[in-house]
């Protein structure tokens, strides 16, 4: 067992222990009384049901993380990566021969098979928990509306998208590595960044509609109110759409998507059923706030910068023989080096994500304040947030460690307290 093996084992088990500890601490807070003055008073039966849903979800997360960690360790320590690499080399040589290419083509084919094989194995390992979460956990609490056919169709479409879009990207990365070796981190960074921007532009019009139906919000009182607000802010949208979220879940949501002229706001049909018009406008104002305040391009830029840092670090480990030996693979290759470094970096990203999540939560406060200021009604946004939390059975008492590790939005109580401190426009 070399040094890398010890580091990886410590990182994987340490990451699992930390996340499990956070979940266990969170379980102990589900029944904590809520602070006064937040307007979160609700019937005891409803509160108790929310607590059971949150606790059930956390226990499921613990089981899934534990099983996933155990499967990874067994696969790794039993030589699974070496077997996968050997199978991929055989298949890559065969496919490269059919393609009539040289060693470079064979190397790319080998890498694609290796990525695909590990991706399929990972999906199969997580499938039982996905099925349980959808058809048992969510069903038990009245959220699930996904049929088995829709579940299978979603999986197939997602897999096809990964193959159609991720395949050429992976091939391009492997080609650049074959040309420039570890020094390819800079052109690879450029390629990945361009790809990310392309997906951001394509997603609203071509990718998201593969999974949901987007219908323009019809003319009426709500549409007029939203148009007045958006126009008053000097903001332009390429569309305001209703999403058939009820086809899969009873949960309510809204989100902003797209860049430039492809900027859209999507409102779940379930949200329109539960919120009144003023509350929907407040939710839209929050989403407009994210764009007006520059949150989306800033976070995209930070994500690109983080990718660049990761690729730069990759250049030091990509062909490190001891790293390959730690995973039971004797022959150094770029495709395996990419996977091994990503596995080495994944536990580290849990900690680097703490700062990223903190910035995201700060952005949520800023978007709330923007919506409150531009509508003059922080009380209306507070009402909308309370309804969203109640309908989605949100965890109202997360442990601070859970928040630091995983939460991209502040806990509801803190958001309501921040909104409660803002002035209300009268008249």
Image: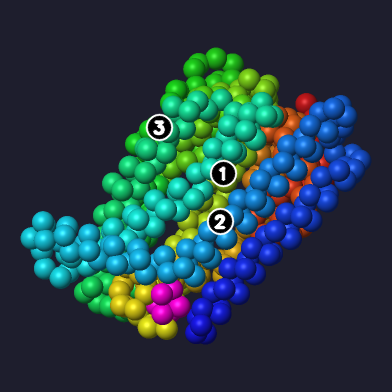
The prevailing secondary structure element of the residues shown in magenta is: helix
Distance from Cα at disc 2 to Cα at disc 1? 10 Å
Q: Residues within 10 Å of mark 2 (few under 14, many from 20)?
A: some
Q: Secondary structure at mark 2?
A: helix
**Residue 290 image point, x, y percent:** 57, 46
Left or right for 111, reference 23: left
Which of disc 2 and disc 3 is earlier in sequence? 2
Up the image or down, 158 lies above or below 79; here it is above
**Residue 257 image point, x, y percent:** 47, 41
Rendering quarter of residue 39: top right
325 drawn magenta: yes
| Residue indicated by mark 2 | 68
Which of disc 1 and disc 3 is earlier in sequence? 1
Which of disc 1 and disc 2 is earlier in sequence? 2
Up the image or down, 402 lies above or below 268; here it is below
Up the image or down, 305 lies above or below 169; here it is below
* Residue at x-position 64% and y-position 63%: 16
Rendering quarter of residue 425: top right
Q: Secondary structure at mark 1?
A: helix
* Residue at x-position 40% and y-position 32%: 153
Q: Verify CB contact (< 8 Å) between mark 3 and mark 1.
A: no
Question: What mark, if any, has residue 153 been given in the picture?
Answer: 3
| Residue indicated by mark 1 | 129
**Residue 189 image point, x, y percent:** 36, 67
Q: Of the residues tagged 3 and 1, which is closer to the observer?
A: 1
Along the line of sight, the residue nearer the viewer: 375 or 314: 314
Distance from Cα at disc 3 to Cα at disc 2? 24 Å
178 drawn magenta: no
Magenta stretch, residue numbers: 323-328
């Amino acid at each position: 067992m070399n040094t890398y093996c010890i580091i990886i084992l410590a990182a994987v088990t340490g990451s699992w222990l930390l996340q499990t500890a956070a979940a266990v601490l969170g379980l102990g807070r589900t029944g904590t009384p809520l602070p006064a003055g937040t307007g979160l008073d609700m019937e005891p039966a409803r509160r108790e049901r929310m607590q059971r849903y949150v606790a059930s979800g956390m226990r499921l997360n613990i089981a899934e993380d534990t099983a996933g960690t155990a499967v990874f360790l067994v696969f790794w320590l039993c030589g699974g990566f070496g077997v996968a690499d050997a199978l991929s080399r055989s298949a890559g040589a065969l496919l490269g021969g059919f393609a009539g290419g040289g060693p470079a083509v064979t190397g790319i084919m080998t890498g694609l098979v290796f990525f695909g094989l590990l991706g399929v194995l990972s999906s199969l390992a997580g499938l039982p928990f996905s099925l349980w979460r959808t058809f048992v956990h969510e069903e038990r609490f009245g959220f699930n509306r996904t049929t088995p056919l829709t579940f299978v169709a979603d999986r197939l479409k997602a897999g096809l998208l990964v193959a159609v879009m991720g395949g050429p990207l992976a091939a391009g990365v492997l080609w650049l590595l074959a040309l420039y070796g570890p020094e390819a981190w800079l052109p690879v960074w450029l390629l990945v960044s361009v790809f990310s921007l392309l997906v951001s532009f394509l997603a609203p019009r071509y990718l998201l509609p593969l999974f949901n139906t987007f219908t323009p919000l019809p003319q009426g009182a709500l549409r007029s109110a939203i148009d007045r607000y958006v126009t008053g802010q000097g903001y332009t949208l390429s569309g305001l759409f209703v999403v058939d979220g009820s086809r899969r879940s009873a949960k309510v949501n809204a989100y902003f998507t797209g860049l430039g002229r492809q900027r859209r706001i999507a409102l779940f049909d379930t949200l329109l059923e539960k919120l009144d018009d003023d509350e929907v406008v407040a939710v839209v104002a929050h989403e407009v706030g994210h764009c007006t305040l520059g949150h989306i391009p800033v976070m995209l830029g930070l994500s690109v910068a983080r990718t660049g840092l990761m690729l730069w670090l990759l250049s030091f480990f990509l062909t490190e023989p001891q790293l390959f030996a730690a995973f039971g693979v004797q022959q150094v290759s770029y495709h395996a080096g990419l996977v091994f470094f990503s596995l080495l970096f994944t536990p580290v990203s849990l900690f680097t994500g703490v700062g990223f999540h903190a910035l995201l939560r700060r952005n949520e406060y800023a978007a709330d304040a923007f919506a409150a200021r531009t509508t003059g009604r922080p009380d209306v946004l507070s009402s909308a947030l309370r309804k969203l939390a109640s309908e989605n059975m949100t965890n109202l008492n997360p442990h601070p460690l859970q928040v630091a590790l995983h939460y991209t939005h502040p806990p509801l109580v803190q958001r309501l307290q921040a909104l409660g401190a803002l002035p209300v426009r009268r008249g």
